[in-house]
Image (cartoon, rainbow, N blue to C red):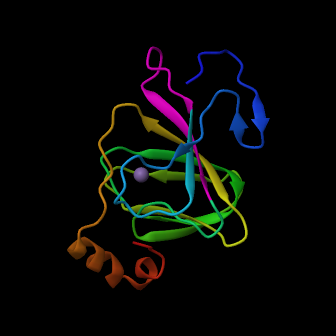
Amino acid sequence: MSEKTHIPQTDPFRWEGVPLLAYKEESGSHFKAITRQVLFDDGEHFDTQLRYFEIAPGGHSTLERHDHAHSVMVIRGAGSALVGGEVFELGMRDLVRVPPATWHQFRATAGEPLGFLCLVRRERDKPRVPTPSELAQLQADPKVGGFIRA
Ligand code: MN
């Protein structure tokens, strides 16, 4: 994490000195083709982290929930998101609010990546994936069941 005042973009959606990381360190969660970059992580002055995630065309994030919230802004491409019981089409610079304890999953459209900024608390609980019975409950709603990938 750079401590510099100005961090120029070096390539599209890449920033000087900001490493390109795997989406999640631990395996076992379900996801496809996602990168993560931590843009701001200044624990001295902020209780938050700002990350940039990019989902490859046709890929998706983990179906998960947790006690912390996400504030998301789309800055590349297009896709869709499940938040709670609703599915939303996402366009450039749309905002998505993921409240605590709410199932969510992001998906890139077939032809384009989906890139978004995601603000979180620095101190936060680990995401949880659905148990088999929770998954069955989610799949019982046709709108939700038709969207999720788990
Ligand atoms: Mn999450």
Q: Residue at x 57, y 49 (%)?
A: 35
Q: Position of residue 55 (x, y in %)?
A: 60, 58
Percent x, y for residue 91? 69, 60
In the image, residue 102 above or below residue 26: below
Residue at 21%, 75% (x, y): give it.
133
Query: Is 92 in the magenta?
Result: no
What is the x, y in percent for residue 126?
30, 46
The answer to which quarter of the image holds residue 128 is bottom left
For residue 17, which quarter of the picture?
Answer: top right
Q: Residue at x 60, y 40 (%)?
A: 20
Residue visible at 77% across and 33% down? 10
- Image quarter hosting the C terminus: bottom left
Identify the image quadrant of the N terminus: top right
- Nearer the observer, 98 or 129: 129
State left or right for residue 73 relative to residue 139: right
What is the x, y in percent for residue 82? 47, 66
| Residue 45 lies in the magenta stretch | yes
Q: Which residues are magenta?
A: 39-55
From the viewer's perspective, is residue 113 above or below residue 73?
below
Side of 4 where 30 appears, left or right: left
Q: Is residue 45 above or below residue 32?
A: above
